[in-house]
Amino acid sequence: MNIDLAYQNEVTDFKEDYEKDFQDIIQTTLEVLHINDDIEMSVILVDDEKIHEINRDYRHIDRATDVISFALEDSEQFYMEGMPRELGDIFISVDHAKMQASEYGHSLRREMCFLFCHGCLHLLGYDHMTEEEEKEMFHLQKVILDKLDIKREG
């Protein structure tokens, strides 16, 4: 299994680097879900203004949010044998992550990791539109973050 994660920080005044954490999370996610495919994906850190624009233009929701995932496997794209699975793109609002970390009383690292894990599961086809889906998805997030010892409080 090979993981190609394109990590991009578009927030010029945000100097923290989560690439290693994100690599560990996607690796653990694939192990927990028993996925052995080579995968490619990207994560882009943005501010609230940019994520608001993305949310408005692509989801028709006129407000900022914390994380948006664009799963390529949701589209008509198909998997070609011998090629890596291109999962898609995750956009994380650093502004929202900072606000939520403060609101929930845990570290910014924990919030960034949670949002990335949440986005990864969306790219892999998980959702939380029903109570049952939400229960499954949030359980997986907890399992993955606990395996990496990324706890709520720190």
Image (cartoon, rainbow, N blue to C red):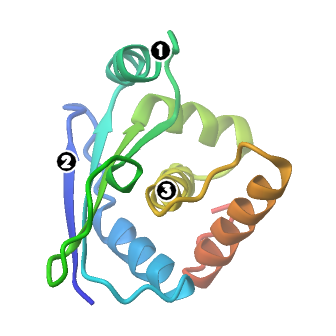
Q: Position of residue 11 (x, y in %)?
A: 25, 32
Q: Of the numbered discs in the image, which one, if any, rests on residue 76?
A: none
* Number of numbered tags placed on the structure image: 3
Quarter residue 7 falls in? bottom left
Q: Position of residue 36 (x, y in %)?
A: 37, 89
Q: Earlier in the sequence, mark 1 or mark 2?
A: 2
The residue at the point 30 percent across, 53 percent down is 88
Mark 3: secondary structure: helix
Most extreme residue toward the left is 83
Amino acid type, label 1: His
Judging by the rendered image, the residue that carries numbered circle 2 is 8
Q: Position of residue 84 (x, y in %)?
A: 19, 75
Mark 1: secondary structure: loop
> Could you classify mark 2 by the number of other residues whose Cα lies within 10 Å: few (under 14), some (14-19), or many (20 or more)?
some
Q: Of the numbered discs in the image, which one, if any, rests on residue 109?
A: 3
> Could you classify mark 1 by the number of other residues whose Cα lies within 10 Å: few (under 14), some (14-19), or many (20 or more)?
few
Q: With respect to residue 67, does 79 lie above or below?
A: below
> Could you classify mark 3 by the number of other residues whose Cα lies within 10 Å: few (under 14), some (14-19), or many (20 or more)?
some
Marks 3 and 1, how far apart at CA:
29 Å
Judging by the rendered image, the residue that carries numbered circle 1 is 60
Q: Quadrant of the C terminus?
A: bottom right
Q: Earlier in the sequence, mark 3 or mark 1?
A: 1
Q: Quadrant of the N terminus?
A: bottom left
Give the foreground label among 3 and 2: 2
Marks 3 and 2, how far apart at CA:
16 Å
Amino acid type, label 2: Gln
